[in-house]
Amino acid sequence: MQTVDPPQSPIRSWKAFGVQYFMIVVSILTALGFEQVVTNVRRTSGAEDAQREIEEELRKNLKDVRESYQSNAGRLTDLEAWDGEAIREFGSATPNPANQQRLIASAQGLWKRNSIWTPTLQHAAWDVAIANQSAGHIPTPTLRKYATAYTAQHDSEEFTRLNFLTTLDEGHLINVMADADLGKATGQDVLRATRQLILVLKQTQNHLRHLEQELVPALPGESATLRNPAPPASTAAAR
């Protein structure tokens, strides 16, 4: 802050006193005004930096969401194709043991190749903006969009955890996979295990589409690209 030096000579009249007093007041107000300008510039700059970092982080997360969705889409297609063939074969009135063993073996390959992808959702930029209070200087409408996006990310992580916990019977899956490795798994067991994976994948895909819709409004220039998959040809024909 600017310092104000006291008068160097005695004040000899009220006029001189008034001039000196006026100069002191002006100097103090100028110093305060300058300090306020500097503070506002710093706050504005900090808010702009925070916005840039937050949007960069959200764009990376959005990219990861889309890549996870596309990877899962191919896996889901493979698993559903297997499921359709398995239903026909295992439900046949005249089962073919060779075909059933082939399907069980192919299911083992699908299990190993078709892990479920979920995005790694970063939030460090948001945490820093909250911690250093720069978020408080971001325009309210923009800040609200950021808050909504990060809340959606948090909810997504909770959903993913609960989806796996409540849908997958991990103990049963391990046992079926072990039986398949030993050549002792039945077609019905393999079908049930695969159905669990398909259900988790479908629920994951639905949630990834929802998460994309929550992230897009916070990012200028972005629009939703993930769509519900087209129904199988047999279903479309039935309609």
Image (cartoon, rainbow, N blue to C red):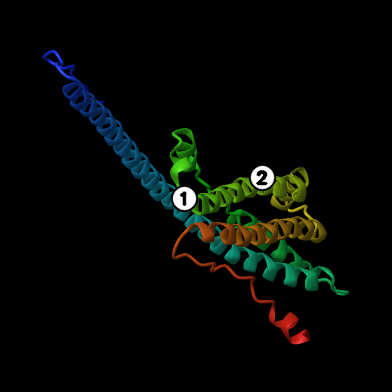
> Residue 9, percent across and down?
11, 14
Q: Amino acid at mark 2?
A: Glu
> Residue 46, percent across and down?
37, 41
For image coordinates 54% across by 54% down, the residue present is 145
Residue closest to the eye, 118 or 26 = 26
Residue 96 left/right relative to 23? right
Q: Secondary structure at mark 1?
A: loop
Crowd rating for badge 2 (residues with CA inside 10 Å; few <14, some 14–19, many 20+): few
> Residue 132, percent across and down?
44, 34
Crowd rating for badge 1 (residues with CA inside 10 Å; few <14, some 14–19, many 20+): few
Quarter of the figure with residue 16: top left
Mark 2 = which residue?
Answer: 158
Residue 203 drawn above or below residue 127: below
Residue closest to the eye, 23 or 130 = 23
For image coordinates 50% across by 43% down, the residue present is 123
Residue extending farthest right: 93
Residue closest to the eye, 171 or 184 = 171
Q: Secondary structure at mark 2?
A: helix
For image coordinates 60% across by 70% down, the residue present is 227
Mark 1 = which residue?
Answer: 139
Residue 177 left/right relative to 44? right
Q: Quadrant of the C terminus?
A: bottom right
Q: CA distance from mark 2 to mark 1?
A: 29 Å
Q: Is there CB contact under 8 Å for labels 2 and 1?
A: no
Q: Amino acid at mark 1?
A: Pro
Residue closest to the eye, 206 or 235 = 206
Disc nearer the start of the sequence (2/1): 1
